[in-house]
Image (spheres, rainbow, N blue to C red):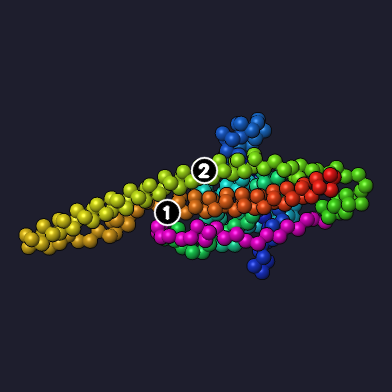
Amino acid sequence: MVAGSLLGLDQKGVLEITHSFPLPLSKSDAADAGAVEAAAAEEFTDGDEYQMEMMKMLREVNMDNNCVGWYQSMFLGTYNNLSVIENQLQYQENLSDNTVVILYDPIQTANGSLTIKAFRLSEAFIQIYRGGGNEFIAPQNILVELPLKIRNPGLINALMYDLESSKTLNCDFDRLDLSTNPYLEKNLEYLCDWVDDLAAEQQKFQYYARNTARQKWKKKQENEERRQRGEDPLPDADDADKTNQPARMESLLISNQIDQYCSQMHHFAGASFGKLFLAGSLHKEDS
């Protein structure tokens, strides 16, 4: 996993990202990566310190040094976790409500589908999270996906024109591969794991519901006995029941991630059918 900071400008409601730089790895990850990364991790033990130093250096060379968010790579569209939510919440609380997180999936991009998304926490979710509440919110309303437009620099456009006029190009036909088993197998494997996690979260809620119903029945019986003895009934304990409720956040994020896997498989299956029809037509013409 790779993560870093995004630099740019916020102009009339449009967030323009012009530069970015990666953040140093943790000591454990850097030790696995190599000696150079390990030395960098030893020098900058604090990610905030490293970020401030980089922004100062960029300002000295007249580059945009205004932090507008952060980016992170993801594997097969897996991004619905507490780490992403908490990091984005810190950015929106400490910097600005307009900060975003950009998620890039290199696996899906290598399979022919450019996957780069921009998200921001919704205002309704931030209010619930700040208040420490446990209210229900629709899973799709936690992270708001923003429209994204990619523009190439002038040098990249010049290179594209140069390649277009070139007569010799290396064609890559890997994206026309009809084999869909590895990609769908991985998605189904992760989908089954997340469904198991959702079932575990549902068991927590079922246990809480059974325990609450049992306590209410005992309280009802005790109040009946106190009424027969001429005593006042016990006070309600609704507040205590609310404090013991299991957190909804994990189950909401898991539900959102399951929906993401289903959408990915639906999109990939549609593209695979298009490849099969194309290959069938070519086969008929050859025969």
The quadrant of the picture occupied by the C terminus is top right
Magenta stretch containing residue 137, yes or no?
yes
**What residue is at 59 percent from the left and 57 percent from the top?**
119
3D distance between C-alphas at marks 1 and 2 = 20 Å
As shown in the figure, which amino acid type bears the numbered disc 2? Answer: Cys
As shown in the figure, which amino acid type bears the numbered disc 1? Answer: Arg
Magenta stretch containing residue 16, yes or no?
no
Residue 4 x %, y %: 63, 47
Q: In this orientation, does residue 44 appear?
A: no
Query: Looking at the picture, does residue 238 appear above or below residue 37?
Result: below
Nearest the viewer among 198 and 17 is: 198
Instruction: Give the numbered dot on residue 248.
Output: 1
Farthest residue, direction bottom: 12
Residue 218 x %, y %: 19, 53
Q: Residues within 10 Å of mark 2 (few under 14, many from 20)?
A: few
**What main secondary structure does the magenta stretch of the protein show?**
loop
The magenta span reads 132-155
Q: In this orientation, does residue 220 appear?
A: yes
Quadrant of the image occupied by residue 179: top right
Question: Mark 2 = which residue?
Answer: 192
